[in-house]
């Protein structure tokens, strides 16, 4: 999407847009279940009621064959080019956790892991420890490792096994490579600077020292006896939703990373619980204050990463049961999609296109009986780059003027 022509076409209005993101919703057919995906297998009477009057298609988060992280996936949904606008995952986590990042800070997304006696990572998520355990371990690390050299180490616990680390001190720069093998069965790799920048080299040195020191402090803990760090970078400055689209945008997300990426896009973050019903209730409570609502549902992605077909179905069905509460607000445009696919057999993010549904007065009616991967393959929207989705939603909301005479 070229931002220059689009920005000149923006119209002010009163229409309401809802972007409902079921994280990692896209999936692959399970031949053992009759070729169904979780979205097709789920009982979704309310989504089914919307489908005939909606336009369906598929989104391409980055490019053909490219597997996106959650940050690029969401930045693309928000109308930014995910290749030109690269943001470290740590920055997103830190902002979402409430950190006010200062100039020169380097932030990391961190999590506890399980290390074997040989230093090999046997579980990258430490058995998905409870948030209470995470908070206790983070407090221990904060007490035992407050500084490395002349750099302060600021820590904040997150959900489950996740936490945020911010390095604050002189002469730091990012990005640097991850201290994370990204799979089990390998040791934690050393973080490295990409070039000859001495500030990035210092950052990598501090990261490696923290990882080593954390393993010493956590020795004897089980299953969380090590840490991983990734997405190490500093905060960029991006034009926000009010500036780009003349929209008062709200972000309703329980997890820090998604609140962080929404903040970068200039959205107001609305505190919310993890239940789907809580998210929809929060939208209702702020309905008069905003024009655009980004609502994030995490459970679909977690189930996909766990390879749990039934759990992914259950989350989709929970969304569908609560959907009347959202539709009762009468949004002018509702979009249901994901930031990327997290297929159950893959147990991780993938490059597969993501199903998308757009419902509104002028969207066109595909007449599909249901909303899932198969019906989306033949939908009128075709395959759309995720970065172009905002233009599509703005057009359907009557917020784009004609281009040219």
Image (cartoon, helix red, strand yellow):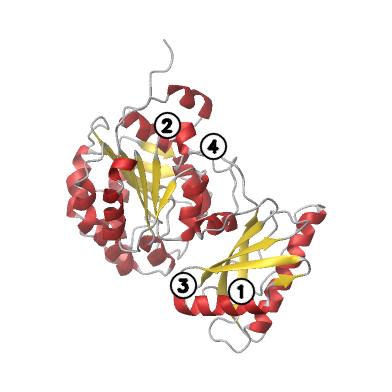
User: From the viewer's perspective, is the residue at label 3 or at label 2 nearer?
Assistant: 2
Query: What residue is pinned by disc 1?
Result: 227
Query: What residue is pinned by disc 2?
Result: 246
Sequence order check, earlier mark of 1 and 3: 3
Distance from label 4 to label 2 (Cα)? 11 Å
Distance from label 3 to label 2 (Cα)? 36 Å
User: From the viewer's perspective, is the residue at label 2 or at label 1 nearer?
Assistant: 2
Query: What residue is pinned by disc 4?
Result: 239
Sequence order check, earlier mark of 4 and 2: 4
Distance from label 1 to label 4 (Cα)? 34 Å
Mark 2 and mark 1 in contact? Answer it, CB < 8 Å. no
Is residue 247 shown left or right of residue 108? left
Question: What is the crowding at mark 4: few (fewer than 14 residues within 10 Å), some, or many (at least 20)?
Answer: few
Residue 251 x, y percent position in the rendering: 40, 49
Q: Residue furthest bottom?
A: 220
* Nearer the observer, 28 or 87: 87
Sequence order check, earlier mark of 2 and 1: 1
User: From the viewer's perspective, is the residue at label 1 or at label 4 nearer?
Assistant: 4
State the mark number for residue 160. Answer: 3
């Amino acid at each position: 999407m070229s931002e220059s022509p689009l920005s000149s076409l923006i119209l002010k209005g009163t229409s309401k847009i809802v972007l409902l993101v079921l994280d990692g919703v896209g999936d692959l057919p399970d031949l053992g279940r009759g070729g169904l995906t979780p979205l097709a297998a789920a009982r979704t009477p309310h989504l089914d009621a919307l489908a005939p009057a909606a336009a369906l298609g598929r989104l391409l988060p980055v490019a053909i064959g490219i597997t996106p992280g959650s940050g690029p996936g969401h930045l693309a949904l928000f109308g930014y080019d995910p290749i030109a606008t690269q943001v470290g995952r740590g920055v997103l986590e830190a902002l979402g956790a409430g950190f006010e990042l200062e100039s020169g800070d380097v932030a990391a997304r961190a999590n506890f892991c399980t290390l074997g006696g040989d230093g090999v990572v046997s579980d990258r998520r430490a058995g998905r420890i409870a948030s209470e355990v995470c908070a206790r371990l983070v407090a221990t690390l904060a007490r035992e490792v407050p500084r490395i050299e002349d750099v302060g180490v600021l820590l904040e616990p997150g959900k489950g096994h996740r936490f945020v680390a911010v390095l604050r001190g002189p002469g730091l720069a990012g990005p640097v490579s991850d201290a994370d093998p990204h799979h089990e069965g390998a040791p934690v790799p050393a973080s490295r600077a990409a070039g000859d920048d001495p500030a990035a080299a210092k950052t990598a040195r501090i990261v490696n020292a923290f990882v080593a020191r954390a393993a010493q402090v956590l020795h004897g803990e089980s299953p969380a006896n090590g840490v991983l760090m990734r997405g190490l970078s500093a905060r960029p400055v991006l034009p926000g939703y009010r500036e780009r689209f003349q929209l008062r945008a709200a972000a309703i997300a329980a997890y820090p990373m998604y609140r962080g990426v929404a903040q970068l896009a200039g959205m107001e973050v609305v505190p919310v619980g993890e239940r789907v019903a809580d998210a929809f209730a929060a939208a209702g409570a702020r309905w008069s204050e905003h024009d655009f609502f980004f609502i994030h549902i995490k459970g679909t992605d977690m189930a996909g990463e766990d390879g749990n077909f039934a759990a992914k179905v259950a989350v989709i069905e929970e969304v569908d049961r609560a959907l009347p509460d959202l539709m009762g607000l009468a949004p002018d445009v509702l979009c249901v999609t994901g930031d990327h696919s997290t297929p159950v057999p893959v147990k991780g993010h993938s490059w597969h296109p993501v199903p998308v549904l757009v419902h509104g007065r002028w969207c066109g009616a595909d007449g599909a009986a249901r909303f899932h991967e198969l019906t989306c393959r033949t939908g009128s929207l075709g395959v759309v780059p995720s970065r172009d989705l905002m233009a599509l939603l703005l057009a359907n909301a009557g917020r784009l003027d004609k281009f040219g005479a």
